[in-house]
Image: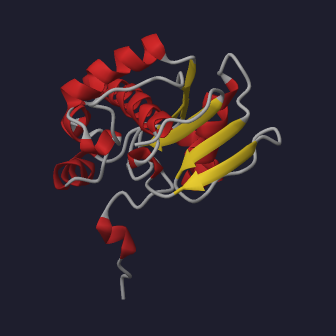
Amino acid sequence: MYNLPCHVAGTDEAGRGCLAGPVTAAAVILPKKFKNELLNDSKLTRENDRNSLKEIIMEEALSYGIAHVYMEEIDEINILNASILAMHRAIEQLHCEPEHIIVDGNKFKPFRNIAHNCIIKGDGKFLSIAAASILAKTARDEFMKKIHQEFPVYNWQQNKGYPTKEHRQAIREYGSTPYHRKSFKLLPEQLKLSL
């Protein structure tokens, strides 16, 4: 896992494949000497470790930003554009303008003419992207746990809005909510043609 010179911002998103809730992104600038054995791609990190790392990152990062793009906007502009928009909004929150941006994945749109690189599986290669993945995931999980209280039948505190069997069964039984992404195929049946 590499750390980079000062003022390189790493950015990543969480919740792209979900049926409900926002897509959430974070951007992080870490100090040059930052090290942490636990820091890795959020998908490979246990929940308790993610929560501990969140506190450490927020405490030690030179700057960070976290942004949600909500369901209505996702439905309007599509999930890829919403993911990039969330990353842009997170970068906008940084206290200092980064000299360079490194992005997890293979798609990004230029931000204020700042040079950027897209890195596939970057959250497992660069500390600042891994840190962004932790902040994005924990912020989104907190949001999903909050809205779980409103609609407990979908069990969002557990599935976080991903298309699990249980989540789809609840959609089948109770229909969709304002938190569901209307542009997504909420049920596999939507794919079938009625002949």
Location of residue 102 in the rendering, given as x and y in whole percent from the top left corner: 60, 44
The image quadrant that residue 35 belongs to is top left
113 horizontally vs 44: left or right = right
Front position in the image: 111 or 31: 31
Instruction: Farthest residue to the bottom: give it.
Output: 195
Give the position of the C terminus as an image quadrant: bottom left
Point out the residue furthest to the right here: 113
Residue 89 left/right relative to 104: right
Foreground: 113 or 99? 99
Res 146 seen here: no
Judging depth in this view, the residue of 73 and 193 nearest the camera is 73
Position of residue 88 measured from the top left corner of the image (x, y, whole percent): 67, 37
Q: Quadrant of the N terminus?
A: top left
Classify 32 as above or below 82. above
Question: From the viewer's perspective, is 72 left or right of 168?
Answer: right
Residue 183, position as x, y percentages in the image: 51, 56
Query: In the orientation shown, which residue stands out farthest toward the top?
Result: 59
In this rendering, the answer to whether 172 lies above or below 93 is below
